[in-house]
Amino acid sequence: MDLLIKGGKIFTPAGFIDGCIGIKDGKIAAIGKEANVPRAERTIDVAGNLVLPGMVDLHVHFRDPGAPEKEDFTSGTSAAACGGVTTVMDMPNTVPPTVDAEALRKKKETAEGKAIVDFAICGGVGVKSIGNVLDIAKEGASAFKTFMTSRFEELFSGNDATLLDIFHQVSKTSLACLIHAEDQSIVAAQVEKLRSAGRVSPQAHTESRPEIAEVHGALKALDLAKHARARLHICHTSTPEVVEYAQVWKNKGLPVSVETCPHYLLLTDDLMAKRGAYAKVDPPLRSESSRMKIWEMFVHGQIDTLGSDHAPYTIEEKNRGETNIFDAPSGSPGVETTLPVMLDCVNRRLLSIERLVQTFSENSAKIIGLHPSKGSLQIGADADVVVVDMKKEETIKADLLHSKQKYSLFENRRCKGWPTLTIVRGTIVAENGKIAVKPGFGRFLRPG
């Protein structure tokens, strides 16, 4: 063996076992008692800590290429590695948008020289790029994304007829179609109404994107995807009613999955009054009653995946919202803090570790065709491992995080349970918050 991880509680498909993982040529070659596993060139004793499959974050915006001052693949994947995330999928709204084969190829080349962890790329599709879907898939996209609201016309899904056409085209690839499901007409009308009334305080952002905009958008997407027989993945769901409707379609046999984010599970809209534009995300944070319902749905298996929606903007861009919240962009860093805030919930017995791994590793890998190579600790899988110390307590401080943008929705949150060692394909990439490999170690992943 090249590496032996011993002394931990290993999360396997059959449950936790006490034993060792033997790694050879970047793959898991043995799992069992130490006496039954061959010797290795290097042995790491993790002293009773949890040994989990590396997390798989399907929803990150690393802004590269086009806006590396906000984030790039080195800083973004460094944050991922220190947060226990071994695989990421980058979204298409970069500059240029990833809406043709050449743009995907250039993003891949950019990332290959910078990435710390393994990465997949989500292709984009909108009113101007429907004809490129098959070429993007051949280039290696792991999924497609379209937006019901977008400043990129190439990614905007347009009217119902266009969205139906998008679903038909994506269904030919057998890849999932991710959707930002907020109805454009409702949001635009609300924003105009609030602006005209001079209501531009932080709380106005929440009112501008009401739950009905998300529900109506999701309903249309579900119905059209069913007709087109497309695989639908509803991103960053904040509204319980969306989850309820998605369950109805699941029961009808539609291959639909639902994602939520830690901020919708743990934070509420009162943070807008305290943090202003730094708490501005789309969809917005919701009421405590909606948060509690989303949490219960997550715990009980009605939500399929957890994603960070890591979406940093510069301090200067965020500060535009000081006098008018609509002048600031929506988004916040999150890939490094997702696992710690959720491990804290496990420690508080609000969530099982099994459910966390299922949503933030196993299911995510399955949706983009990477399981069991990713998202699983079993023989033959990539040796992507995160070691977690469930007794370690730290306070989230944005200045100590690895994103280029030093702010966090979870600033000053005390968390018990932290990733201490992250391994990708048998190589340590991060240890106790420090990167251990050079940029370019991460590999591009194709589905299957």
Image (cartoon, helix red, strand yellow):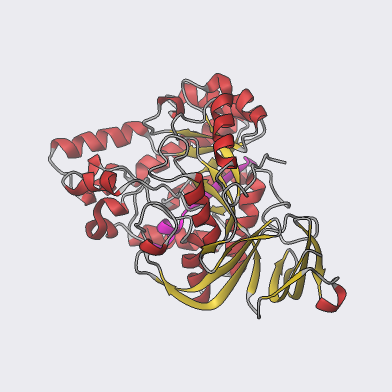
Give the residue drawn at x 60%, y 41%. 112
Give the residue drawn at x 65%, y 45%. 443
- Residue nearest the observer in this picture, 143 or 333: 333
Give the residue drawn at x 32%, y 46%. 314
Side of 87 where 321 appears, left or right: left
Across and down, in percent, residue 261 comes to 46, 54
**Residue 277 drawn above or below residue 419:** above
- Quarter of the image containing the N terminus? bottom right
Residue 83 visible, this angle: no
- Residue nearest the observer in this picture, 273 or 140: 140
Give the residue drawn at x 54%, y 54%. 303
Across and down, in percent, residue 206 comes to 28, 48
Q: Is residue 5 magenta?
A: no
- Residue nearest the observer in this picture, 124 or 210: 124
**Residue 266 drawn above or below residue 134:** below
**Residue 75 drawn above or below residue 132:** below
Span shown in magenta: 253-266
Across and down, in percent, residue 403 comes to 43, 54
Number of disc labels:
0
Residue 368 visible, this angle: yes
Q: Is residue 259 magenta?
A: yes
Across and down, in percent, residue 7 comes to 71, 78
